[in-house]
Image: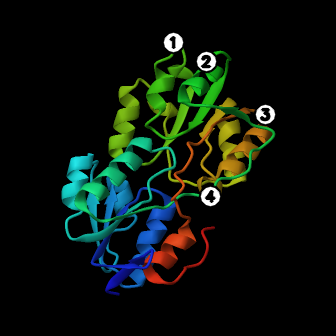
Amino acid sequence: MDDISEGGMSYPGRVAVFAGTTEGRRLVEHLSACGVGTIAFVATSYGASLISGLPHVSVREGRLDAGQMTHALAGCSCAVDATHPFARQAHASVREAAERAGVGYVRLARPAAPKHKGARYVADVAAAADVVASGEGAVLLATGSKELAAFAGRDGLVERLYPRVLPDEEVIAQVRALGVPRSHIIAMQGPFSREFNIAMLRQIGAAWLVTKESGAVGGQDDKIEAALEAGAVPVVIERPLEPEDARDFEQVCLQLTGAVPQPIQ
């Protein structure tokens, strides 16, 4: 496939995908299957391992700032921001890099899930840390490693935390550096089923589950339902608003290839 169309314009060349999410990985797989030359950017070696070896795809591992992204976009036709809904700095950096490089920009947004009446929603990570720090009992922290410092820094809270993070050596080292007991680190790749979450919550005797409002793709409802079943309080950090020009997975696939794969399960 030679051209990529956007708003009636044609962009010959490779597509840059800033991935690190389920939908980002599936987009890279779809582009590969359609024969579209693609550069996939991921932050960790684990993320790279999930998409390595795909035809027509080169993988770049490591975190980049806006300047490095701009340089990396040379020769690309457009940049797809498929980073996590909560990765605000990444969103800004990818958009800035695309503008500087003079290439198209597409934000691939994850669909939001309806609010769950049984969950306690908070505005940000600091508010979630306030909630669990004010109580007692073990905390299954399903927010990822980037937000862990906000919880580990609270007096007496780090010993109550059971962070569930990606099985990546660098990530695990960061968790250990924050003082989390080795036996409390749960290094696994999700999403997880409701039944699996229930078993995990009961295994650690969790009184709290903290997660992000990450939508169905992130297993949000399964986590909340599991917490309620296991007798834990689900605390959900509300997701930031997406920009008005954001598009969903199917729209991006159609825009770039004219075809849509099977829906995300």
Disc 2 designates what residue? 133
Under mark 4, the amino acid is Pro
Under mark 1, the amino acid is Asp
250 in relation to 259, above or below: above
Dividing the image into 4 quarters, which one contains the C terminus? bottom right
Disc 1 designates what residue? 155
Please say if the residues under marks 2 and 1 sit with CB atoms less than 8 Å apart.
Answer: yes
The disc, 1 or 4, on the residue closer to the chain's N-terminal end is 4
In this image, 237 relative to 153: left or right?
right
237 in relation to 225, above or below: above
Residue reaching furthest front? 8
**Image quadrant of residue 47?**
bottom left
The disc, 3 or 4, on the residue closer to the chain's N-terminal end is 4
Under mark 2, the amino acid is Ala
Task: Report the residue at 26% width, 45% height from top.
Answer: 65
Task: Report the residue at 55% width, 80% height from top.
Answer: 260
Disc 3 designates what residue? 231
Disc 4 designates what residue? 111
Name the secondary structure under disc 2.
helix
Name the secondary structure under disc 4.
loop
Viewer-side label of 1, 4: 4
* Residue 155 visible in rendering: yes
Q: Where residue 252 sits: x, y (%)?
A: 49, 71
Viewer-side label of 3, 4: 4
Residue reaching furthest bottom? 1
Alpha-carbon neighbours of circle 2 within 10 Å: few (<14), some, or many (≥20)?
Answer: some
Name the secondary structure under disc 1.
loop
